[in-house]
Image: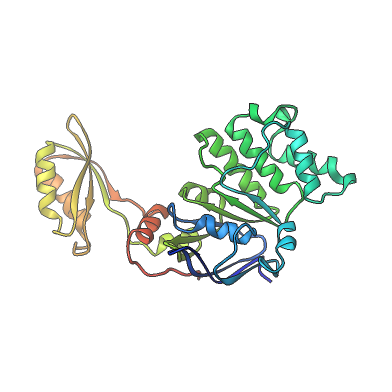
Amino acid sequence: MAMIQVENLSKSYGPALALDSISFEVERGEVVGFLGPNGAGKSTTMKILTGFLLPSSGRASVDGLDVVEQSLEVRRRIGYLPESTPLYTEMRVDEYLRFAAEIRGVERGRMRSAVSRVVELCGLERVTGKNIIELSKGYKQRVGLAQAMVHEPDLLVLDEPTSGLDPNQIVEVRDLIRRLGEEHTVILSTHYLQEVEASCNRVIIVNLGKIVADSTADELVATMPCGPIAATIRGDKDAVLSQLGELVPTDGGIELKGAVGDRVDVEVKAGETASPGIEEAIAALVVKNGWGLVSLGRRASSLEDVFRSLTTSDRGVVTHA
């Protein structure tokens, strides 16, 4: 049985449809990135799975338990870190984690070891005696993760876990999520592509309340054509741009990426009507004009290209293989 099963789930806020009959499953042991732009329906889905919102229609279950009919049992199996980390900032870190363990039903005899385990896992040893209000945002996020795990849940639901953190803090939290994925089923809601690439073995992309892709990152990238051609040429900037423009079909284009001295960096979007030999034609043009060719090659497609394609166009749904 899958850890999460979602069937034709919809949610409306008055006339606004936040989720439009979405369906997906998450197997035990998977780390799944739930990816989408702001307003796509990510947080709404997470709140329904964790019992904070009721769906308008459809069904969702966790570990075989209906999230509406068996909400309390579902919550016992879930560790939830919402987008706004729920902390009592006047409490010390150790006090707060003991409190979280108690309300999560951790037995008194296991309380000390449960708290010690998440303190070590989340790297909180240096701050356990501090009031939460004194902590940096990165440490507060770690405390939020620790409270979500203190009862050793089967499923972790993380909603924008690195939102608002600085680059160093983001790397630390990503490393922690990667380690958590070795012991838990994790669904990670975010609009940060690097988060998914660094932490997840499967990607679900949602846009305007609908699932538009469900596969691994590599499989999704493989559906995209190669990216534009990047070239660095030594020559007169105006001549390079003018003559390259004559090679490119009308549905393509030339973008100047930078120019220092006689070094010109360009990106060539060849368009759908370009011949396969466009790179060879560029090289021949460089030789003909006596320019210098520093580098030439196509940029590999990325998850960002997939994301932009699926969330800014009417491209069809890509499903899990």
To which quarter of the image does residue 259 belong?
top left
Could you tell whether 141 is left or right of 71 in the image?
A: left
User: In front: 12, or 176?
Assistant: 12
Seen as rendered, the residue at the extreme right is: 109
To which quarter of the image does residue 186 belong?
bottom right
Could you tell whether 177 is left or right of 150 in the image?
A: left
Q: Looking at the picture, how far across and down is residue 264, in whole percent?
A: 20, 37
Residue located 72% across and 33% down the image: 93
Task: Report how many numbered discs are placed on residues in the image.
Answer: 0
Residue located 71% across and 27% down the image: 130
Could you tell whether 285 is left or right of 188 in the image?
A: left
Q: Looking at the picture, how far across and down is residue 43, in whole percent?
A: 53, 55
Could you tell whether 305 is left or right of 233 in the image?
A: right
On screen, residue 49 above or below 159: below
Residue located 65% across and 47% down the image: 179
User: In front: 226, or 192?
Assistant: 192
Q: Do we see residue 72 in this rendering? A: yes
Q: How has the structure been colored for display?
A: rainbow
User: In front: 154, or 238?
Assistant: 154
On screen, residue 53 above or below 95: below
On screen, residue 25 above or below 106: below
